Image (tube, coloured by chain):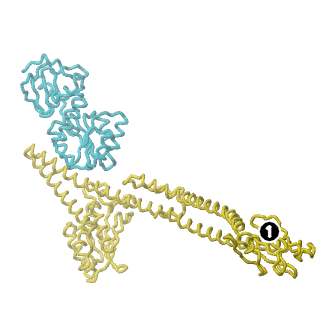
Chain colours: A yellow, B cyan
Amino acid sequence: MSLRLRLVVTLGVTLLALWGITAAWLIRDLSTQFEQSLDRRLAQSARMVAGLMERVPADAWRGDTGEIPVIPALEGVACRVSSLRGQVVAGTHPELNDVLSTRVAGYGYRRHDGQRWRVYTLTDENRRITVADRMRERESLLGQVRRAASYPFLLALSGSLVALWWGVTRGLTPLARLQRRLAQRDHDDLSALPTRGLPGEIRPLIDGFNTLLARTRRTLEREQRFTDDAAHELRTPLTAVRTHLQVARRVDGDRRREAMRQAEAGVVRLTRTLEQLLLLARMDNDAGHDDLEPARLDEALETALTETGSHGRCRLDGVDASLCIAMPVTLLVTVLRNLIGNARHHGDPHQPIEVAARRRDAGIVIEIVNQGAIIPPERLANLTDRFYRGNHPRGSGLGLSIVKALVERFGGALTLASSRETPFRVRLWLPEGQG
Amino acid sequence: MRVLLVEDDAPVAAGIEAGLALADFVVDTVGTLAAAGAARKTIDYDLVVLDRRLPDGEGLGLLQAWRREGVVTPVLMLTARDAVASRVEGLQGGADDYLVKPFDLDELTARLQALLRRTAGQADRLLHHGRLSFDPVDRSVMLDGVPVALIRRERMLLEALIRARGRLLSADQLKDRLYGVDDEVESNALNVHIYQLRRKLGRDVIETVRGVGYRLGNADGAVHA
């Protein structure tokens, strides 16, 4: 059920009921009042006749004339004056005996020839005066009054209904406009809806909708960028492999060996990129490692140092057998290997890489610091983006994003800093495991 | 013919360079937009192979700037993005052709040859001059329908002269088409190649305009040596 119909029906029925009840009440009241005032008039005419009769000479009552004075009849109104004994002295409508020959004083209804009359009888010491109104006249008069009273009501009611329809339609215009705008939009259109001219009630809704759209847009853009980056990172080494293989087919001797070597280097690079992409994908999809065995930091560090061949380059501080991290050992090794490898590749080759560990806040802080050029803050912020390679075209640009994803996956945190004292410092906070 | 290759990935650049050299192109490789802009100002390249994604920006931006400046050198764009929208964007941005990585070397050389042909407004694959004909694709030279054996630099020299269609080319312009920036060039190397061409295709095949340069001579008079 549309909002407009619902509003119109609810308000319309209410209005109809209110107006109807008011009108019925008023008309009933009016009818009672009207009847009463007609009755009063009937009684007054009886008294008026009585007053007139006072002046009539007394011998007129003796009834010896034998002639009843008949007043010309008026349509719908009758009157009779009679003695207390029932002798008619004067009156209209001599045929209306059923109606006028009553002995009961006061108001009453009488019937004659299928027509109802309202009768009032006034009795004093000499006479009885009966006046009657035909009910047909009374009812038609009452009907006219009722109709006249109900016209303004009908007018007001229909006016209210029209105003209601117009008001609801007008009030819902912003919604209708919004609906049209939404219907006209392209499926892929993720631009924000305009909020200008929107009523306060819908505005929060549209604001929320726009926020959602913006988030979707950002997600899509990020995914698009990731797809582009992934395509670039996979296709570039593939191009190198392919061209070098094609060159190798056409040349021989040293040039052929060189081309084959280049092709192989391309395959190695492609493999590494693929492995890292798969690792990232696994991390994005993996439900969790509930049954994880905590890793000993000293052992993981030892493996990472061996794998990167960095024993001679690193200076360790505070790493001992008591430090355990709530993270599978293979993944901890991946994290450390990536960080130490980065420090080796990008740091000053003549300065040691410092690796320090200590307990803090129910976890373990690991700091890896290397010497080298200071990195400006805007580049520092981009370093953990997937495929961000900075000025180092050799890397896949995935290392730090993998480290970040892994660390956050296990509830840890990664912060990068660069200053004069520590040209590049990676600080990891990882939850401590019970070893 | 001289090609400027703008590609930041060294292994890819090395592969393309080696492949194009096999098709007698002289290739200069640069890895940044800045270097590409500088290189184009120094040497009059016949073709540019431009990667879209470079460390200092988007290749398309440089291309658009060139086109605004009125540079008409044919440009083939390389990209890893195969979306139709991105190809359309490249072509509308001024690229003459578009190739998605990874590509076939033969396709790359064929497309570059086609670009050269289109730039010259030439319909036939063969280049003709009098009794001479030159096939840029399989690099063969025929005189009166008889194949003539030329070494690589002689072929490149002849191609440059034929493609110039009788225009005068200075010694430096000719050297640009024979040697890359890294090649060691002996001072009389060009003269040696001209001498050899005249010996193999006839004295009048190359006309020397003293102090200005060289152009193709009246090949009708060329005598098979």
Position of A93 relative to A248 (above/below)? below
Q: Is residue A374 visible?
A: no
Residue that carries the numbered disc 1 in the rendered image: A92
Q: Secondary structure at mark 1?
A: loop
User: In the image shown, does B57 or A118 lie closer to the viewer?
Assistant: A118
With A407 as the anchor, is B161 left or right in this view? left
Question: Image quarter for residue B208?
Answer: top left
Question: Image quarter for residue A33?
Answer: bottom right
User: In the image shown, does B62 or B96 lie closer to the viewer?
Assistant: B96
With A176 as the anchor, is B160 left or right in this view? left
Q: Position of residue A10 (x, y in %)?
A: 54, 67
Count the numbered circles shown. 1
Give the amino acid type for the residue marked by disc 1 in the picture: Thr
Q: Position of residue A368 (x, y in %)?
A: 31, 69
User: In the image shown, does A231 or B7 lie closer to the viewer?
Assistant: A231
The residue sitting at 24% across, 28% down in the picture is B121
Q: Quadrant of the C terminus of chain B?
A: top left
Position of A317 relative to B188 (above/below)? below
User: In the image shown, does A163 or A193 lie closer to the viewer?
Assistant: A163
Position of A34 relative to A181 (above/below)? below
Q: Residues within 10 Å of mark 1 (few under 14, many from 20)?
A: some
Q: Is residue A295 visible?
A: yes
Subunit of label 1: A
Q: Position of residue B29 (x, y in %)?
A: 24, 43
With A209 as the anchor, is B138 left or right in this view? left
Q: Quadrant of the N terminus of chain B?
A: top left
Q: Residue furthest top?
A: B221
Q: Position of residue A231 (x, y in %)?
A: 25, 54
The residue sitting at 62% across, 63% down in the picture is A157
